[in-house]
Amino acid sequence: MTITRVVTKEDMKAARFVWETCFPDDEAAFVDYYFKKRTHPEWIMGAFEGERLIGTVHMLPQTARFFGLERHGCFVAGVATLPEERGRGIAESMLAAAFSTMLERGFSHTTLKPFSEKLARYYERFGYEPFACRDEYELSLSDFSDVKDVSVHVPDASELLSIYTAFAARYNGMRVRQEADLSLLIEELSTYESALLSDGKAYAACYLKDGAAHAFELAGEHPAPLLKALCKRYGTVHAAVSAGTPLLQGKTPSCEPFNMLKVLDETAFLRGLPVSVAELLDQKETNYSFEVY
């Protein structure tokens, strides 16, 4: 018989085993960092066959702003079932239990990032709806012939926070961050091949793969000069901006649904907001978020 419950400290070794089995591409250093700094037993829902942990759902508390008002929610990550146990509805049971736990703990909403259209359709079954879209660009130095050169540097957490806070104020759904959160971002980047650069107006946090830089966080004013500097260093840069945001004239992006939202407590979530949930979800160009844990 399968039961679902929040894991304990004694279950954490097994929880890590589930993560490493289901996400084998994650660097060991990142997994060390994640289980030491980003998650805790009380925020992991587990599925158990007897004493054996066979699946997990990670609930990461985050506060986000909507129309200037703070809302407490959980980002769902690490939805995983051991390969030999799949096809039995384990993930569905864990998600249902996670939603109940989040609601009991006073969270008004939950978000997640699907990594494919197939997964997006899967999570729609549980009440998640597309919330933020982004435009994806593949860039090379030739795209920046009319963009000025700028000097760049590696920013500290204080500089990141200043740029991020101004940038996040433009959108609904961006996480409220403190300097400690940006220090954690810097630490996370140190666990895999990465780059973090700023020109004082914008910053880009990138992972490096297959000879290209992939900017998974791009924040700030007029990022084109910074992206040009990245192209000079890495050749090809993959960068994303909120859907409909002008980046480069003559360059056509691909648009992808990026984040999904499920409202757990509609009364609490909507209190003071000038729109309904449906109206909020329809305002894709004013909604945005990043994916970092």
Image (cartoon, rainbow, N blue to C red):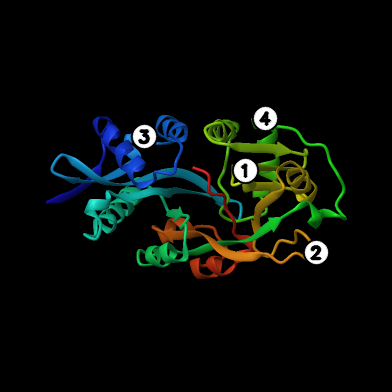
Residue 33: which quarter of the image? top left
**Where residue 2 sits: x, y (%)?**
16, 51
CA separation in Å, label 1 and label 3: 26 Å
Q: Nearer the viewer, residue 218 or 17?
A: 17
Q: Nearer the viewer, mark 2 or mark 3?
A: 2
Q: Nearer the viewer, residue 69 or 45?
A: 45
Q: Nearer the viewer, mark 4 or mark 2?
A: 2
Q: Which residue is mark 1?
A: 206
Q: Which residue is mark 3?
A: 40
Q: Residue at x 50, y 45 (%)?
A: 63
Q: Nearer the viewer, mark 1 or mark 3?
A: 1
The residue type indicated by label 4 comes to: Asp
Tell me the element at label 2: loop
Tell me the element at label 4: loop
Residue 280: which quarter of the image? bottom right
Numbered label attached to residue 152: none
| Nearer-N-terminus badge (3/4) | 3
Q: Which residue is mark 4?
A: 156
**Where residue 112 sits: x, y (%)?**
45, 54
Q: Nearer the viewer, mark 1 or mark 4?
A: 1
CA separation in Å, label 1 and label 4: 15 Å
| Nearer-N-terminus badge (2/3) | 3
CA separation in Å, label 3 and label 4: 26 Å
Tell me the element at label 1: strand
CA separation in Å, label 1 and label 2: 23 Å
Q: Which residue is mark 2?
A: 249
**Would residue 64 be found to the left or right of residue 239 on screen?**
left
The residue type indicated by label 2 comes to: Gln
Crowd around label 2: few <14 · some 14–19 · many ≥20 (10 Å): few
